[in-house]
Amino acid sequence: MTHWQLDNGTEVEIINFLDDHSRLIIAAEAHATVKADHVRDLFERACVLWGTPASVLTDNGAIFNAAHRGGRSGFESDLLAAGVLYKHSSPYHPQTCGKVERWHQTLKRYLAKNPASSLEELQLVLDRVVLRYNEQRPHRSKGRVTPREAYEARGKAAAHTLINQPHLRLRKDVVDPWGKVTVRYRGRILHVRIGHHHRGKRVRLYIIDEQIRVLDDDGNYLGEITINPEKNYQTMAKPKEN
């Protein structure tokens, strides 16, 4: 979502969806204020036109996710029901969504040359710039083909193809002063409680789907966690004594 001003000074907002590979603008819609229901409705309509994606990346805006509230937004629930893997950027790190931010720059240069005095006029301008950008203007980063050509030239990953893949990785971290480390899991930052007595210790987290085994830097087993995706805070179970 990005902000804009109508010709009469009225503040408005524009919600955009962009295809990561081709840079095709999937949807662009203007509102007085973009609300969570607008996001859900536009995404549903975009899926009807272009197909349901395998994954979606957004920033941490409240219209997209409820991570900061410790819950799940309607949009997140829609993605889960559709089998779409949801990922969001790290806080205060707009570079993660750099492709759509670059589109916002291009869009605003065009809008500045084509002022609109109402939401209806602005939407007409948006429709024109999206058509030109998608189907007439070759994109330098895509080998001088249009985003539409790049989109149609490549096979698509369907929904459910990513969300059900095994989640395998190793994460190295240092236990913070509160006895915790953080883990990104299925696009969310989770706080894992290792224990105050491990403060400052370097640890390795072996993550296999929802299971995390925790070892120190010398390879000593410290415990394990079974991730509860409904909670932002996870607690490590201590190893059983023989």
Image (tube, helix red, strand yellow):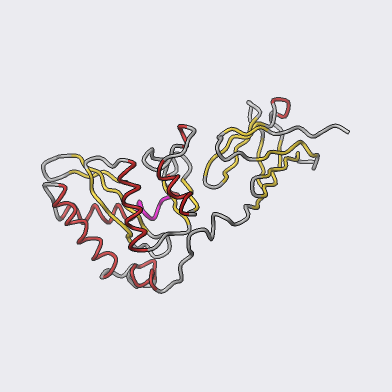
Which of 149 and 41 lies nearest the eye of the viewer?
41
Residue occupying the point 39% across, 55% down: 99
Where's residue 95, x and y in %? 43, 49
Q: Is residue 159 left or right of residue 171?
A: left
Identify the image quadrant of residue 124: bottom left
- Residue range in magenta is 97-102
Q: Is residue 134 left or right of residue 8?
A: right
Which of 22 and 224 lies nearest the eye of the viewer?
224
- Decide whether residue 99 is among the magenta residues: yes
Identify the image quadrant of residue 76: top left
- Decide whether residue 36 is among the magenta residues: no
Q: Is residue 100 above or below residue 33?
A: below
Main SS category, magenta section:
helix
Where's residue 113, x and y in %? 15, 55
Where's residue 101, x and y in %? 35, 51
- Image quarter of the C terminus: top right
Which of 151 and 106 lies nearest the eye of the viewer?
151
Residue occupying the point 72% across, 42% down: 213
Residue occupying the point 32% across, 49% down: 41
